[in-house]
Structure formats: C-alpha cells, structure tokens
Amino acid sequence: MSSRYPGVLVIPNALGDVDGQAAELKVTREPGRSSMLEPDIDVLRAFGASPWEVTQRLPLSLRRLDKVWPAGLAPPCFVKVDVQGFELNVLKGFGELLNSVLCIELEVVLVPLYRSQPHLVEIVDFLRANGFGLVRLASMGLYAKREMIEFNAFWVRQSGHSSAGVRLWKDMNGIGNQRRLVVWGH
C-alpha cells in the first residue's frame, strides 16, 4: 500500500506483455501523450504534431502484471488502462488475472497515433476472445476540429452483466441509458 495514497495498491512497474523486456518510455512535450510507442509524426502532422514531440527517452524494464501482482491479494475486478497506445500489451500481461476482471475501460483509436499501435479491431478481437463484450464507445472529441479518431471503450465480461458490481459500474459510466432519436422518412 502507498503512503501517498492510503488504501491504494501502487505497483511501481512499467507494464507490458513480456516480463523483463527492455523498453523505452518516449516522454513527449505534453506529458499526457508520453508512451512506450513512438508517436507517428506523419499521421499526427495533420492534427498539429507538436504536443507529441519526444523530448526525452527513458530506458526501463517492462513487467507483466501477473508477475508483480502481490500473492494473496484478490485479482482486480475493474480495470482502467490509459497508456497511450500500449493498452493491448498491458492487457496481455495480465495473464490469468484477466479471467477475474469484470469490467475494463481503455482508449482505442480508429487511426493509430503511435507506430505499432493496435487498431480498434485488434483490441476487439483480443477482448472478445477473452470473454468481453464492447458496451460503449465515448468519443474523446474531434482531433484538430476535424474528425473523431480516439474513444474511451467500455467492456464487460459477457457472463457478468447481472452482478451488482457490474450494474453499478455500468450506471457510473452511463452504459445502457443512452437515448437515441430515430427519424423515419424519405
């Protein structure tokens, strides 16, 4: 447990899918865009690439979550992954812990912003193969006031929809109560 965040488990490791893999954190001008992946400046140029400019490169070693999760501690049930394009690698590093997860929130893209960033379809395939269904996509807005390319994606384990915890998580994230307008005509 953390003294800075009482009651919160802090795992002081960079997570990935290969335990012990040497990697490099690309720190960008806007720190919230920093990633294990290289920003794809050719793609980003159309959206104003300067916040993605890499200003520092930090070497580190990746760990799988299933290798650093404390023994005897219950596996996580609800997960939010926000690692700028490296989400699929982190999820693969859950190993068997993923079987205990009921709900996941992560970012997905229609246009990869980082080199080797998985496309939405790759993440859908992985999570569906592991028993999850996509229940909501929430746009993160228009990039350069032009188009929607990045979304928060919400997933629920197919067998867990009726549990009280999942129902609460869905309510908190506005899942299942969307309103829509249907217009019929020619």
Image (tube, helix red, strand yellow):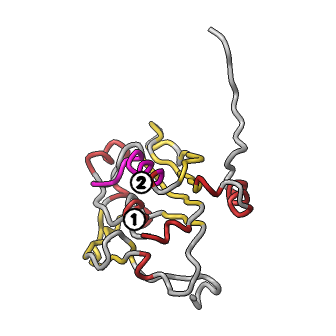
Residue 120 painted magenta: yes
Quarter where residue 63 is shown: bottom left
Q: Give the vertical position of 167 relative to 182 (above or below).
A: below
What residue is drawn where x is 49% and y is 71%? Answer: 97
Q: Main secondary structure of the magenta part?
A: helix
For this orientation, the residue located farthest to the bottom is 3
Q: CA distance from mark 2 to mark 1?
A: 9 Å
Start-end of magenta stretch: 115-128
The residue at which mark 1 appears reads as: 92
Q: Residues within 10 Å of mark 2 (few under 14, many from 20)?
A: some
What residue is drawn where x is 42% and y is 54%? Answer: 126
The percent coordinates of residue 132 (x first, y second) are 53, 53
Camera sees residue 42: yes
What amino acid does circle 2 point to?
Phe
Whether residue 161 sits left or right of residue 40 in the image: it is right
Q: Are marks 2 and 1 in contact (CB under 8 Å)?
A: yes
What amino acid does circle 1 point to?
Lys
Camera sees residue 138: no
The residue at which mark 2 appears reads as: 126
Query: SS class of the residue under badge 1?
Result: helix
The percent coordinates of residue 165 (x first, y second) are 71, 64
What residue is drawn where x is 29% and y is 64%? Answer: 54
For this orientation, the residue located farthest to the front is 159
Of the image marks 2 and 1, the number of the one nearer the N terminus: 1
Q: Give the vertical position of 76 relative to 81 (above or below).
A: below
